[in-house]
Amino acid sequence: MALGFFGRKLVKYWNGSSWSESQYFGKIKMWDGSQWRTVEMQVAQDIAVSFSPDGGTSAGAPVYLADYAYYPSSAMVTVSCSAPATWTWSFTGSFPYSSVASGGSGTSIMFMLDSASGSYYQSNITLSGNAGGITRYWTINLEADGYA
């Protein structure tokens, strides 16, 4: 797993004879569960977390997203993050397809609601995403109209 830094932080590492702290380091020893291995690491840059589209900064003020589809299309909304995020969501109305289960993680999440001939479906989704200590909030409305 890659190291991710959300602000300047020192990393403790074993230099072969003692523990050291640095943000930039070369050959270090890491325990792989059975033996010490020498590895080379370098922090290239701090990771800035951003969501697209950006969400609200509190649950009480989410950003509203919506899509409306006529048969035979599907209503769909995608939210992405520059780093793996934990996505938490709930819904009312019709059950939407989601690319990530609530509580799961990934760099994006997509919600979709299929339309069917002679049917109307609507789903209201409450979504939050958390990455690197940053949480954003959205309210999503999907409508799939098979009567139009």
Image (spheres, rainbow, N blue to C red):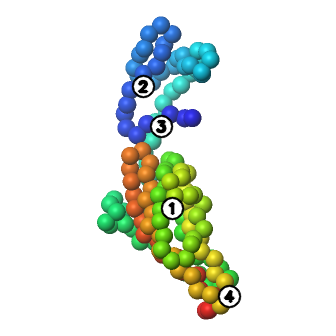
| Three-letter code, disc 3 | Gly
Q: Residue at x 60, y 68 (%)?
A: 97
Q: Earlier in the sequence, mark 2 or mark 3?
A: 3
Mark number, residue 79: 1
Which mark is on residue 4?
Answer: 3
Q: Is residue 106 left or right of residue 48?
A: right
Residue 11's mark?
2
Counting from the top left corner in percent of width and height, residue 15 is at 48, 13
Give how far across and how far down residue 126 sits, in percent: 44, 67
Q: Is residue 32 left or right of residue 92?
A: right
Q: Name the residue type under label 1.
A: Val
Secondary-structure class at tag 4:
loop
Dot 3: few (<14), some (14–19), or many (≥20) neighbours within 10 Å?
some
Residue labelled with disc 4 = 117
Disc 4 from disc 1: Cα separation: 28 Å
Q: Quadrant of the N terminus?
A: top right
Residue type at numbered disc 4: Ser
Query: Please, is residue 130 above or below residue 13 in the view?
Result: below
